[in-house]
Image (cartoon, helix red, strand yellow):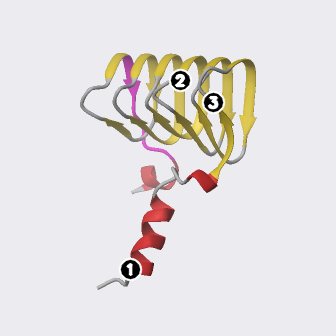
Amino acid sequence: MFAKKDKDMISRRESPLEKSDIKAFLGPGSQFEGRLVFNEIVRLDGAFRGEVTSKDTLIVGDSADLQAEVSVGTLIMSGRFKGNIKAVTRVELRAPAQVEGTIETPALTVEDGVVFNGTVSMKRGGAEGAA
């Protein structure tokens, strides 16, 4: 039904993991402490302590270790995390993530192999809650 080109375009739009879409990257072995504010997709694979604020997507790789207060549009977590997460759109916990803390989001996905110890609060927001 769809041409190959159309399928490629659809899958690209749905997956924020394209390397060309990532605007900042904290690589494995690096350490950062402080406040991170961004407007586009950011990927963290190193150690981070502090606060993360964005309306866009934060990708946390499997080698990452975060202790933070996170407030983002979407969070895709594969690493170790301790703290509080608020996501406007969704949170995806992907194996081998280890998460300890609170999650507040309207949509949560947890893969097999993820370790989660904490609390989850799910409320519909925006246009979704008006239905």
Q: Amino acid at mark 1?
A: Lys
| Label total for image | 3
Of 103 and 61, nearer the camera is 61
Comes first in the chain, label 2 or label 1: 1
With respect to residue 124, does 95 lie above or below?
above
Magenta region includes residue 121 = yes
Label disc, if present, on residue 64 of the rendered structure: 2
Q: Which residue is mark 3?
A: 27
Task: Give neighbour class at mark 2: few <14, some 14-19, many 20+ (Cα, 10 Å).
Answer: many
For the point 34% across and 83% down, the residue is 2
Comes first in the chain, label 3 or label 1: 1
Q: Amino acid at mark 3?
A: Gly
Label disc, if present, on residue 4 of the rendered structure: 1
Task: Give neighbour class at mark 3: few <14, some 14-19, many 20+ (Cα, 10 Å).
Answer: some
Magenta region includes residue 27 = no
Q: Secondary structure at mark 2?
A: loop
Distance of label 3 from label 2 (alpha carbons): 9 Å
Q: Amino acid at mark 2?
A: Ala
Estimate the x, y position of residue 130 in percent, counting from the top left. Answer: 44, 54
**Residue extent of the magenta highlight:** 118-125
Task: Give neighbour class at mark 1: few <14, some 14-19, many 20+ (Cα, 10 Å).
Answer: few
